[in-house]
Image (tube, rainbow, N blue to C red):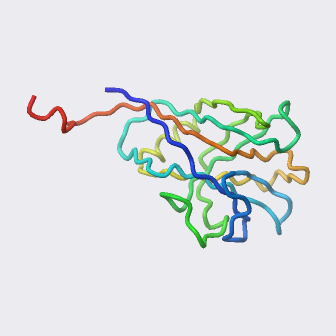
Amino acid sequence: MASTVSYSASLCTRHYNSSSNAKNGYASQEFYDSSYNNVGIISFVGMNLANKVITSIWLDIDASKAGYGAGSTKTVFMRKANYQNGIASGIAGWQYTGDELGTFDGSFYGNYTSYYITGSLFNAMAAYIAAGNNSFTIPTSDAIICIDVSRNPFAKNIVLAVFLILSGVFPFFAGI
């Protein structure tokens, strides 16, 4: 049996060295210098797809107007989150940021766009989600300095949709 499920994200942005939210309801990745950079936190509260076979993932992203504009390509650096099931308080951005999952590129400027996740990023995200995880971070690469905020995907809404294959015994079929 196959099914598609979708989840809306809880979003915030934390300063790398602070546990307070720099932005509530938005996830952005920004790096200015070693004293000021941000980590976007994305949590799909209630998502538990542990031990499911995930066959496709796509993200619907509603982006604010931040950076150069719609014609500019920006890279999203997807990483694991060290905390799950909501946005934990009292945790600095650097403490929240887990291992790398991969990247994807897109235009994020006042638009709503679907991004179909493929390749090694899909494999990494599918394994991470199937392990029961539901939160991600989007820090920027330290190699990209965004003094002009040109590469900071600034999302105000993210929906993750997953196509998966369900198997096993379903209680409503028992005894048939």
Q: Residue at x 86, y 52 (%)?
A: 146
User: Farthest residue toward the right?
Assistant: 148
Q: Is residue 93 above or below residue 6?
A: below
Question: Position of 106 compared to 173: left or right?
Answer: right
Q: Nearer the viewer, residue 130 or 58?
A: 58
Q: Residue at x 52, y 62 (%)?
A: 83
User: Farthest residue toward the left?
Assistant: 175
Quarter of the image where one finds residue 34: bottom right
Quarter of the image where one finds residue 175: top left
Across and down, in percent, residue 90 comes to 60, 73
Q: Quadrant of the N terminus?
A: top left
Q: Residue at x 55, y 52 (%)?
A: 43
Across and down, in percent, residue 65 comes to 81, 41
Across and down, in percent, residue 56 comes to 49, 30
Quarter of the image where one finds residue 115: top right
Q: Quadrant of the C terminus?
A: top left
Question: Position of 173 compared to 135: left or right?
Answer: left
